[in-house]
Image: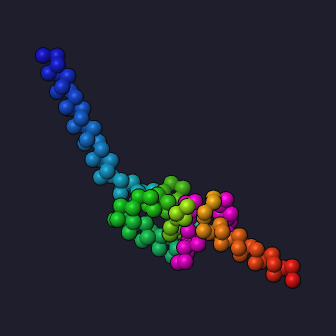
Amino acid sequence: MKENKKTEEMKREEKLKKKIKDLKKESRPYIAYKKLILTAAKSEYDPRDVVDSLKFVSMHIEKKNWEMVDRVGGTSGDLMARGACPKCKINLVGKDLRPREFTLPCLIKGCTFMEAAQQENGRKKSNSIC
């Protein structure tokens, strides 16, 4: 009899865990929109840029691309981010997807943006010597 009660309790507990998991999955888009709205409200960017960011993130919410949603609209999100470096995960901004100047150098070996920045700095130094 006791074993029967334990198995019933375990089944009930498993059902509740599954239900909680399903509810968390279902609520994720709503939580993402809430964070996005709070991030946009705190933003000091131009209103047009904020609207573009809202559209960008809503597209990623529909696609369930949660990494990009958190990167742009998360609690400490960057509304201007449109991608991430595959090597060092620095936010990439603009249509040409480049990191901001103040984020470089990242000092991660193999980062294409760091190598490009070092080459550019080498050209600037050689031009200033002449």
Magenta includes 95? Answer: yes
Q: Is residue 93 part of the magenta span, yes or no?
A: yes
- The magenta region covers 88-107
- Pinpoint residue 92: horizontal percent, then vertical percent: 56, 68
Q: What is the total number of numbered labels drawn onto the structure image?
A: 0
Give whichever of 59, 118 is nearer the camera. 118
Above or below for 8 versus 15:
above
Left or right, 60 with respect to 88, comes to left
Q: Is residue 20 above or below residue 49?
A: above
Quarter of the image with the N terminus in it: top left
Looking at this view, is 42 or 23 the one in front?
23
User: Which residue appears at 22% of the width and 37% of the height?
Assistant: 15
Quick check: 104 left or right of 57?
right
119 or 67: nearer the eye?
Answer: 119
User: Is residue 35 in sight in this rendering?
Assistant: yes
Residue 32 drawn at (x, y percent): 41, 57
Decide: is 8 above or below 101.
Answer: above
Residue ID at (39%, 66%): 60
Which quarter of the rendered picture does the C terminus lie within? bottom right
Give residue 85's quadrant in the image. Answer: bottom right
Viewer can see residue 43: no
Report the magenta stretch's main SS: loop
